[in-house]
Image: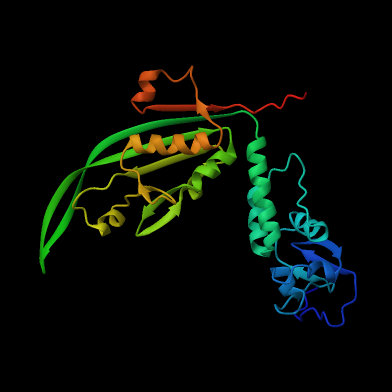
Amino acid sequence: MRAQSQHCDFSIMSEPITLNVGGKLYTTSLSTLTSFPDSMLGAMFSGKIPTKKDSQGNCFIDRDGKIFRYILNFLRTSHLDLPEDFQEMGLLRREVDFYQIQPLIEALQEKEVELSKAEKNAMLNITLDQKTQTVHFTVREAPQIYSLSSSNMEVFSAHIFSTSCLFLKLLGSKLYYCFNGNLSSISSYLQDPNHLTLDWVASVEGLPEEEYTRQNLKRLWVVPDNKQINSFQVFVEEVLKIAMSDGFCIDSAHPHTSDFMNNKIIRLIRYKKIKIGR
């Protein structure tokens, strides 16, 4: 049976209301759905935004049905209650962003900070590599006159592993690739929740901006400081700053001091603080 296309008529709708969210049914009240008028749900169920029905006459929302339970419970209680073993913070964040319930957005941010502080012992290991390569490019000296030039370029690579998924997300909020004139968070380059590989180059004097794009050369920046990372020394300093702000400290047993000072290996650890009762 095909879904009906007519909009839900809230002027005649009596409580309760049954919603079909991504195939999962929820029953609630109109007053609950409109408790935050400036939110997406507030607009949908006040008639400001057209809302579709499914084949059974239920208002249909094409979003994740499982996650919606946490959104609905927040509307009911103004509290964000998540199970202790909740593993879908990324999905919840995207759904919360869609519904645009400002107090829920703030509650989720507070919850993520709380989870980060309460996270168990963690380890961070970064292996660094650096090489020099020659880059060839053309320089426009005058209209219709070009010359071929070349220069040495420093190429950097960092392989990052952390048992803390939240720390890698924190790192992703601070480090950005500069490519094609735009900054993009390194978060989108996460291979999996615990691994991240970064590849970037230092700026080359005289290399035209369009050559970085043409040769697929990414540079690395720290935000909001707007600071370019042109050496491993700067990279190490910035990573240490971010890691130590998240409770990490240098592992005194590993790596060997010479490796650490030569910027080959960075290993940090974080111990969960244990509260001792009186």
Q: Residue 113 at what x, y percent from top left?
A: 63, 44
Q: Residue 222 at what x, y percent from top left?
A: 41, 47
Where residue 145 sits, quadrant-wise, is bottom left
Q: Image point 73% across, 54% down: which residue?
A: 67
Q: Image point 84% across, 71% down: which residue?
A: 30
Give the left or right position of residue 217, taking residue 167 as reference: left
Q: Image point 31% across, 34% down: which residue?
A: 130
Give the left or right position of residue 190, taking residue 55 as reference: left
How many marks on residues? 0
Where residue 28 sits, quadrant-wise, is bottom right
Work out which quarter of the rendered image holds the C terminus and state it. top right
Front residue of 42/277: it is: 277
The vertical placement of 82 against 195, above or below, is below
Work out which quarter of the rendered image holds the N terminus and state it. bottom right
Q: Residue 218 at what x, y percent from top left?
A: 35, 49
The vertical placement of 58 against 159, above or below, is below
Q: Image point 69% across, 43% down: which residue?
A: 87
Front residue of 264/146: it is: 264
Give the left or right position of residue 72, taking residue 113 as reference: right
Give the left or right position of residue 208, taking residue 100 as reference: left
The vertical placement of 196 against 97, above or below, is above
Q: Residue furthest front?
A: 278
Front residue of 66/209: it is: 209
**Way the structure is coloured:** rainbow
Q: Residue 157 at what x, y percent from top left?
A: 37, 37
Where residue 180 sits, quadrant-wise, is bottom left
Q: Residue furthest right?
A: 15
